Image (spheres, rainbow, N blue to C red):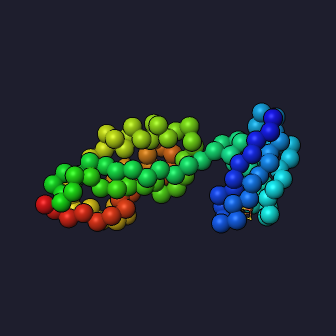
Amino acid sequence: MNRTLTCILCPNGCELEIVYEGTQIQSVSGNKCPKGAGYAEQEIKNPMRNIASSVNLEGGTMPLVSVRLTGPIPKAKIMDVMAEIRKASVKAPVQIGDVVIADVLGLGCDVVATRNVGIK
Ligand code: SF4
């Protein structure tokens, strides 16, 4: 099979041409550096993504606080993690970096606040 994707690891944005069978990479071209081949392999074998969202906030000057993961997770787990984020609720005040959900779903990443919100 063939697949074309854009490497997002740096601003060059190389267009990668990937030839693969199942999860076995046969060739990668179009990459200006070796990182592109690694990125292509990751995307074919186990694509990872980060998530930014918001969580309900009790007693704050805003009803929600923005959050993000501390690292990427498997793309296939995004909907499950979003469900955990929707269920979560925290009490004001919240500081940037506060852990809202520790080790979400055992994936090795925390959900942390990305803004400060004071008490109402
Ligand atoms: S292949 Fe290398 S040079 Fe090209 S976008 Fe990826 S990291 Fe940047």
Question: Residue 19 at what x, y percent from top left?
Answer: 83, 42
24, 12: nearer the viewer: 12
- At a point 80% along the width and 39% down the height, the residue shown is 2
Quarter the N terminus occupies: top right
User: Quadrant location of ligand 1?
Assistant: bottom right
Q: Give the quadrant of residue 115.
A: bottom left
Left or right: residue 6 compared with residue 2? left
- At a point 47% along the width and 50% down the height, the residue shown is 51
Left or right: residue 25 compared with residue 9? right
Residue reaching furthest to the left: 120
- At a point 52% along the width and 52% down the height, the residue shown is 50
- At a point 37% along the width and 62% down the height, the residue shown is 114
Question: Residue 112 at what x, y percent from top left?
Answer: 39, 57
Q: Is residue 89 above or below residue 8?
A: above
Q: Would residue 19 be seen by someone viewing this image from the given angle?
A: yes
Q: Would residue 99 be seen by someone viewing this image from the given angle?
A: no
Left or right: residue 90 compared with residue 103? left
Q: Is residue 21 above or below residue 26?
A: above
Left or right: residue 61 compared with residue 10? left
